[in-house]
Image: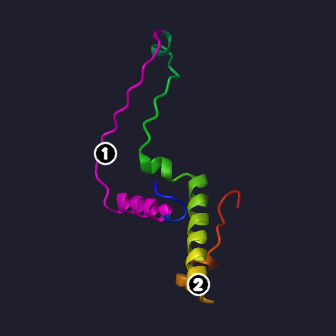
Amino acid sequence: MSKRPFGTLNEIFKYRNLLAHGKPELIERSKEMETAELYNPHQKINLQTWWEKFESIENCKNCYNDIKQAIESIKQISEKDTLPIGILSIEYHGPDA
C-alpha cells in the first residue's frame, strides 16, 4: 500500500472496484502441519480474501480518518476556507464511535 493517508484512497477504490466488478476468485493456501494438527477438528486455515479482511470495523475507522486527513491536507495546500466535497460534515456513528 502507498503511504497514508493518500494511499488509503487507492485501497478504497480497489475495494470498490472489486465489489462493483466482482469475479470468481480461487483461494489457495498451504500450511505445514505436524501430524497431531492434522487430526485436530478445530484446526482452521484462513481462507479470507483481501477484500474480506479490508472490510473490518477497524479498517473502516482507519479509512475514515485517512480520508479526513487527506482532505485537511488538500485544504491547507489550497488555502481555501471551504472544504472540497463536504466530506468532513459526515460523522462515523458505528460501534465504538
Q: Does the magenta segment cover residue 36?
A: no
**Residue 83: mark:** 2
User: Observer-nearest residue: 81 or 63?
Assistant: 81
Q: Secondary structure at mark 1?
A: loop
Image quadrant of residue 96?
bottom right
90 is higher (above) or lower (below) than 50:
below
Which of 82/15 is in front?
Answer: 82
Residue beneath disc 1? 25
The tag earlier along the polypeptide, 2 or 1, is 1
Residue 42, how many percent across, how many down?
53, 22
Q: In the rendered structure, which segment of residues is drawn in magenta? A: 7-35
The mark closer to the camera, 2 or 1, is: 2
In the image, residue 15 sits, relative to residue 91, either above or below, namely above
Q: Which residue is most to the top?
A: 35
Badge count: 2
Circle 2 packing at 10 Å, graded few (<14), some (14-19), many (20+), is some
Name the residue rendered at 63%, 79% in the picture: 89
Specify the farthest residue to the right. Answer: 96
Mark sitting on residue 87: none
Where residue 88 sits: x, y (%)? 62, 77
84 left or right of 92? left
- Type of amino acid at the residue the image marks with label 2: Leu
Q: Residue at x 49, y 52 (%)?
A: 54
Relative to residue 73, is residue 35 drawn left or right? Answer: left
How far apart, in angstroms, are the residues tagged by discs 2 and 1?
Answer: 39 Å
